[in-house]
Image: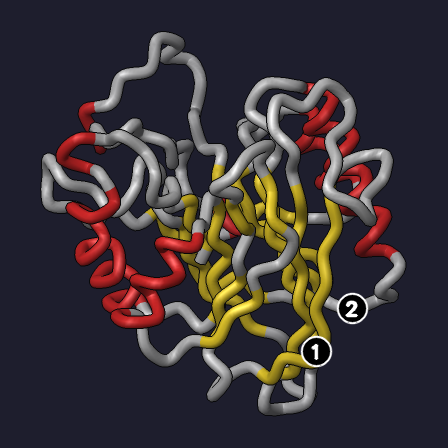
């Protein structure tokens, strides 16, 4: 699952975190993913999940956004299904080893990764990120940096999740495609759809109706079989789990 949860410090009225937190957790529990890439994840979200979302361990990764309260591209996983072997992260900048921004990014951004082993012994790497919402250059250069960092890990199956603030066909999407990544939504033969809805669900009407607004992706590279991929629209209007729909894919690797 990839899920931008819009943190916990926004003034969202009926959709403020304390009013939607219970629904947010119930949606996750109902669909029960083994692996989740969160974006805009903050300490208050962590505190609530510790109390209410059982069965998961997590890797927060490097914080991002310019000022406190910072956000995290947290990775949650079920240890009964996945063994954590290694993890790390970096900032999307010309100085990836330190908290910094480049390429006219509006917000400092980061990537978080974890290496897992499945019960049959096969291994894969999951990287989770959130690209800048303003600077096209930052999205492009950040994507190229992500790909370079993943190449260092060798020939291993990869899953990349995130809020890419870009749509299919955008430069970022093409850069991933040229590097051998496939889009689980497309692999599952799904029609165009949107994942961002501003807490309005299916009533959200963007100004540019020619745009897909599918900015939350699950990308794969390697021997993955994409069995399904769905945009989860569970809600109790006017309350929604987030202003983004979570996306969930069922993936498998050939048995060792």
- Residue 101 vs 110, above or below: the answer is above
Residue that lies at the very extreme toward the front in this rendered image: 68
Position of 215 compared to 23: left or right? right
User: Which one is earlier in the sequence, the residue at label 1 or at label 2?
Assistant: 1
Residue drawn where x is 44% and y is 58% of the image: 1
Residue drawn where x is 27% and y is 17% of the image: 205
Q: Position of residue 82 (x, y in %)?
A: 55, 81
Residue drawn where x is 60% and y is 84% of the image: 83
Residue 186 at least partly seen? no
Q: Position of residue 186 (x, y in %)?
A: 52, 44
Residue 167 at least partly seen? yes
Whether the residues at callouts 1 and 2 have beta carbons within 8 Å, the answer is yes
Residue 43 sits in quarter: bottom left
- Secondary structure of the residue carrying tag 1 is strand
Q: Which residue is mark 1?
A: 123
Position of 191 compared to 205: left or right? right
Q: Which residue is mark 2?
A: 156
Q: Position of residue 146 (x, y in %)?
A: 76, 46
Res 12 label:
none
- Spatial separation of the CA atoms under disc 1 and disc 2: 7 Å
Give the colouring mode of the picture: secondary structure
Q: Position of residue 173 (x, y in %)?
A: 65, 33
- Residue 200 vs 232, above or below: the answer is above
Residue that lies at the very extreme toward the left in this rendered image: 237
**Where is the C terminus found, in terms of image quarters?**
bottom right
Of residue 124 and residue 193, the one placed in the foreground of this image is: 124
Of residue 227 and residue 51, the one placed in the foreground of this image is: 51
- Secondary structure of the residue carrying tag 2 is loop
């Amino acid at each position: 699952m990839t899920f931008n949860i819009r943190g916990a410090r926004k003034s969202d009225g009926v959709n403020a975190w304390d009013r939607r937190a219970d629904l947010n957790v119930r949606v996750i529990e109902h669909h029960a993913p083994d692996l989740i890439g969160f974006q805009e994840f903050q300490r208050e979200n962590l505190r609530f999940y510790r109390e209410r979302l059982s069965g998961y361990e997590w890797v927060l990764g490097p914080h991002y956004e310019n000022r406190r309260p910072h956000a995290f591209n947290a990775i949650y996983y079920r240890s009964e299904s996945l063994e954590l072997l290694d993890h790390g992260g970096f900032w999307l900048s010309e100085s990836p080893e330190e908290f910094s921004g480049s390429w006219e990014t509006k917000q400092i951004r980061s990537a978080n990764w974890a290496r897992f082993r499945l019960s049959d012994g096969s291994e894969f790497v999951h990287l989770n990120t959130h690209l800048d919402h303003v600077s096209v250059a930052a999205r492009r250069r950040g994507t190229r940096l992500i790909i370079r960092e993943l190449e260092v890990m060798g020939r291993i199956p990869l899953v990349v999740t995130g809020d890419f603030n870009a749509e299919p066909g955008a430069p970022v999407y093409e850069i991933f495609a040229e590097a051998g990544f496939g889009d689980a939504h497309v692999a599952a033969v799904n029609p165009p759809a949107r994942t961002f809805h501003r807490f309005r669900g299916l009533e959200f009407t963007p100004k540019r109706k020619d745009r897909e607004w599918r900015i939350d992706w699950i990308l794969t590279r390697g021997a993955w079989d994409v069995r399904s991929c769905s945009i989860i629209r569970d809600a109790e209007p006017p309350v929604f789990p987030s202003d983004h729909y979570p996306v969930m894919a069922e993936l498998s690797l050939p048995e060792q």
